[in-house]
Amino acid sequence: MKEVFGVPVSSGIAIGCAFLFTGNEIPDIPHYLIKKSQIEDEWGKFVRATETVAAKIRLHLKNTEQAIHKEQSDILKAHLMMVEDIDLHEQIQAHLQTKLENVEWAVRSVSHEMTQKLLGAKDALLRERAVDIADISHEILNELLSIHEISLSDLSEDVIVVAHDLLPSQAITADKKHVKALVCEAGGKTSHVAILARSFEIPAIMGVSNATREIHNGDLLIVNSESGAVIINPDEKELKKHRSAILGLEKHHQKDLALSALPAETKDGIRFSLNANIELPSDVDKLEPYGAEGIGLFRTEFLFLAAIGATGEETQYDAYSTVIKAMNGAPVKIRTCDAGGDKILPEFFPVEEKNPLLGWRAIRFSLAMPEVFKAQLRAILRAGVHGNAEIIFPLVSGIEELDKALALLEEAKEQCRQNGDPIAENIKVGVMIEVPSAALTADILIKKVDFFSIGTNDLVQYSLAVDRGNEKVSYLASPTHPAILRLIKMTIEKAHQAGKKVSLCGEMAASPFFTPLLIGLGLDEFSMHPSAIPRVKSIIRNCLSDDCKKLAQRALKRQSGEEVNKLLEKFSSAHLMYCEELISSTVL
Ligand code: PEP
Ligand code: MG
């Protein structure tokens, strides 16, 4: 028996067998010169690899034609044409003959050149073709290098996934029925994989250094997110102890659920909206027991990540309509695709960026892909007639981006009208405040929109220069840093001066520890993973708004995040004594 420790990011306890996942490692592509006499051999390798890739695509098409959307099968057909494209074959042959480099390098170079050319095209449709080239060259390279990617989507038994790191795209496509917990060496509390683990309601521990060295495939593990421990091959005593702890957690859970019908109201009658963050339409089925009043954040990029080709307007219209109808008139804040950063959609990001978090992300990606963006906006506008949809633009850094996004929204509306499609004409529009420049120009931005939604996960990342997925610097990622408190305060003040509301949908909203402070700062709405709602609600119900205001005033005078945290701890023990267990037992 052995124990390793990390940072718990999604609560719960699980017992199960380890499955070591290594599918995330990018292979090094060999690069060497060949002799003229080797050209024929290298060319033969290329021809065989493309034949295998083409055969695989044909088989996939044959087996799944009925089950997949038309858009997906169109993509597969387009890929098939490209793999067999004479122009690609001629370019590879020319590269082998003129540059005398190995075939893997020839594939890499030719596809890189082709994608760069396409990305520079004026026509958005041509730019989008770059994605397909990158996709098929990846397949051909895998074949040439004999790499067979393991997927988490076709597991046949219950496992605890152990990995160095996971991509959000790998997590979202994982077989949730069989993944019982997650242990990663990388990642932090606000990383997107942590967010997904909470959404799947599975325990997860990140920042477990050496996890992939200490843990072997098939080891029996206890993942205890209450203590941050992963116990490897536990003895009978530990197993018994943890089995009874699992029953204890279930009792707590039942107590939480009893709160669901009560209003989120302070002792002196100030009412707050507690909404849910969701990643996929099916998440709405889990909301009811927790008492979510609306959807405060629908992270639509996960629709794109979950299924290649789910980018079409009709697929999105169905997804948004499902959520909007299920919410029965309650507000549904739909955030436009926040791709990029760590949420790479292979079909749109053929070229790796040096600084993806500062690069082609979120609204920047949407503005560069106007056809993709307008298709999403049309889908939201049309689905909006089924209830109460709102739109949020992510990662806006200034008024120019907002103006462009709003102009494209008008174009999307006009296209719908011309098509005769009924739409939510007066749909509300908001901006995510997640970049310091947005918070600092809140007074300018608020004039053009109906509300703000503060994304503290990114606001902390960009204000404090802390990569939210890097466990080595996660100790710096404090939402109570004075800079963050000032930016939140400024954002709320500017919105209120304009008579508009502010929601907070970063992970800070999910932690009962911060609830009194956020009430005191004047926040109107909280949005969080649904299972956190009862705990935040019970804190709100035990607070007096005046106490919270005084707390916020004091917090704003503190000099460091640590000092603010001490103040919050003191406040909890003085005012929320019976909630202390609840606050300390919360992962975030
Ligand atoms: C945030 O940045 O706080 C946020 C809610 O957006 P995401 O976590 O999806 O980046
Ligand atoms: Mg964000």
Image (cartoon, grey):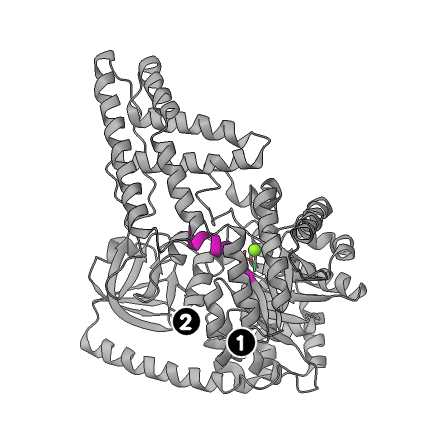
Compared to 379, does 39 lie above or below? above
Residue marked by disc 1:
533
Q: Could you say which quadrant of the image residue 152 lies in? A: bottom left
Kindly state the secondary structure of the residue where label 2 is placed.
Answer: loop
Q: Nearer the viewer, residue 247 or 65?
A: 65
Ligand 2 resides in the quarter of the picture at bottom right
User: At label 2, which amino acid type do we have?
Assistant: Ser
Kindly tell me whether mark 1's CB lies below 8 Å from ligand 1. no
Q: Residues within 10 Å of mark 2 (few under 14, many from 20)?
A: many
Stretch of the chain drawn in magenta:
298-308
Please tell me the numbered disc located at residue 453.
none
Residue 291, position in %: x, y? 54, 79
User: At label 1, which amino acid type do we have?
Assistant: Ile
Q: Is residue 363 left or right of residue 473?
A: right
Compared to 98, does 480 lie above or below? below
Q: Nearer the viewer, residue 316 or 444?
A: 316
Task: Determine the residue located farthest toward the front in the rendered image.
Answer: 420
Please tell me the numbered disc located at residue 11.
2
Q: Could you say which quadrant of the image residue 168 lies in? A: bottom left
Q: Residue at left 25%, top 68%?
A: 16
Is residue 336 rendered magenta in the image?
A: no
